[in-house]
Image (spheres, helix red, strand yellow):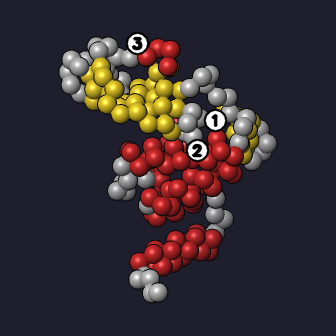
């Protein structure tokens, strides 16, 4: 079991420490994420003193469909977003927390703009926008798969754009 556990609000008393399996803990910090649909709680086990995180979904789990390029619909799966991010960030200085942050931001974008269905294009573009702020190389890797560049010129154009953003960000601002 990982240190990140998912539980339901109604099952809160059944939360067990992923390390020692005891159900005696205290909440250290609570934060809302996913546009208020999930509560992230940082907990500390009273037995082994280790810390872990739980995510409590408010109400029924949402049923969101992703509309793919061929117009087929598949259930939204956060793990697919995280898997793509992990592949793009492989051997890059991007922490697991940063990957989770990007996934959280993508879901916030989805919930703000969609109700029951979202296009795969929207999910991909949102992922790229947030990943770009974290790591430019990981962004290029993700974009190269997501955008399916047909030739090296398209890839070079995207890299040039990302480099120019870095150059502009490093330039001192003159007033």
Q: CA distance from mark 1 to mark 3?
A: 27 Å
Q: Which element is circle 1 on?
A: loop
SS category of the residue bearing label 3: helix
Question: What residue is at 28 percent from the left and 30 percent from the top?
Answer: 51
The local crowd at label 1, few if under 14, some if 14 to 19, many if 20 or more residues have their Cα within 10 Å, is: some
Instruction: Using the numbered discs, state the Cα–Cα distance from disc 3 to disc 2 in whole angstroms.
Output: 28 Å
Could you tell whether 37 is left or right of 22 in the image? right
Secondary structure category for the residue under label 2: helix
117 sits left or right of 102 in the view: right
Q: Quadrant of residue 158?
A: bottom right
**Residue at the image point whose x is 75% and y is 47% from the top:** 69
The answer to which quarter of the image holds residue 47 is top left
Question: Would you name the residue on which mark 1 appears?
Answer: 76
Residue that numbered label 2 is attached to? 108
Q: Which mark is residue 14?
A: 3
Instruction: Provide residue 125's location: percent of width, then percent of height.
Output: 63, 55
Q: Are marks 3 and 2 in contact (CB under 8 Å)?
A: no
- Residue sitting at x 50%, y 20%: 8
Name the quarter where the N terminus is drawn.
top left
Residue beneath the point at 51% across and 44% down: 103
Res. 104 visible in picture: yes
Point out the tag, 1 or 3, that comes first from the N-terminus: 3
Label 3 or label 2, whichever comes before in sequence order: 3
């Amino acid at each position: 079991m990982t240190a990140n556990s998912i539980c339901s609000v109604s099952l809160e008393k059944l939360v067990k420490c992923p390390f020692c399996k005891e159900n005696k803990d205290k909440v250290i910090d609570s934060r809302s994420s996913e546009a208020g649909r999930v509560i992230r709680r940082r907990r500390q086990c009273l037995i082994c003193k280790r810390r872990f995180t739980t995510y409590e979904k408010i109400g029924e789990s949402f049923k969101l469909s992703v509309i793919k390029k061929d117009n087929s619909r598949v259930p939204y799966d956060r793990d697919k977003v995280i898997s793509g991010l992990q592949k793009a960030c492989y051997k890059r200085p991007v922490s697991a927390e940063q990957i989770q942050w990007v996934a959280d931001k993508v879901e916030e974008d989805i919930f703000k703009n969609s109700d029951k269905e979202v296009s795969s294009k929207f999910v991909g573009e949102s992922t790229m926008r947030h990943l770009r702020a974290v790591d430019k190389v990981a962004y290029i890797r993700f974009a190269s798969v997501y955008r399916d560049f047909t030739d090296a010129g398209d890839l070079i154009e995207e890299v040039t754009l990302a480099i120019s953003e870095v150059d502009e960000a490093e330039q001192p601002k003159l007033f």
